[in-house]
Amino acid sequence: MAAQDLSGALPRGVAIIRKSLMPITLGMAGGFAGAIASGRYLEHLIVSAQPLDLPNCVTAAVFLLVAAVVAAWSATARILTIDPVDALRAE
């Protein structure tokens, strides 16, 4: 553990959470782009539709990001409590 602190490496839990949040972030960016595109399409079909309602989009993105962080954190906490030797013996 001391070598990890001296080398500047991230703790195992932080590294696992970072790896699990990367696809979530990319999916949110793709979803936001899709929401903009579909909003512009709906604007042509429905006169009163707004193509991008920024407060609602930001609120939804923050809510989904918090839910993803909680899910990744709980899964990481469970993974870090398992002894690798016991897990290999169970297989």
Image (cartoon, rainbow, N blue to C red):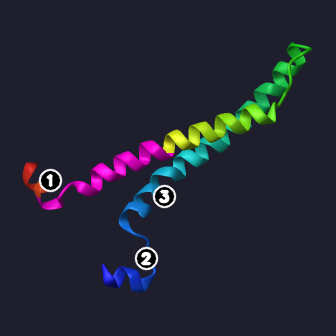
Residue 66 x/y as whole percent = 55, 43
The reply to whether discs 1 and 3 touch (Cβ–Cβ < 8 Å) is no
Q: Name the residue under label 2.
A: 9
Outermost residue toward the right? 47
- Mark 1–mark 3 distance (CA, rounded to whole Å): 23 Å
Residue 37 x/y as whole percent = 78, 31
Give the SS element for disc 1: helix
- Out of 70 and 48, give the one closest to the viewer: 70
Looking at the image, residue 65 sits to the left or right of residue 1; the answer is right
Magenta highlight on residue 77: yes
Mark 3 residue crowding within 10 angstroms, few (<14) / some (14–19) / many (20+): some
Q: Name the residue under label 3.
A: 18
| Mark before the other along the chain sequence, 1 or 2 | 2
Magenta residues, dominant SS class: helix
Q: Where on the picture, by quarter, is residue 58?
A: top right
Q: Name the residue under label 1.
A: 87
The reply to whether discs 1 and 2 touch (Cβ–Cβ < 8 Å) is no
Mark 1 residue crowding within 10 angstroms, few (<14) / some (14–19) / many (20+): few
Residue 51 x/y as whole percent = 84, 27
Q: Please say if 47 is above or below 56.
A: above
Where does the magenta region start and end? 69-85
- Out of 87 and 11, give the one closest to the viewer: 11
Q: Which residue is drawn at 73% across and 34% down?
A: 57
The amino acid type found where label 1 is placed reads Ala
| Mark before the other along the chain sequence, 2 or 3 | 2
Q: Residue at x 28, y 49 (%)?
A: 78
The amino acid type found where label 2 is placed reads Ala
Q: Please say if 29 is above or below 56.
A: below
Looking at the image, residue 78 sits to the left or right of residue 43; the answer is left
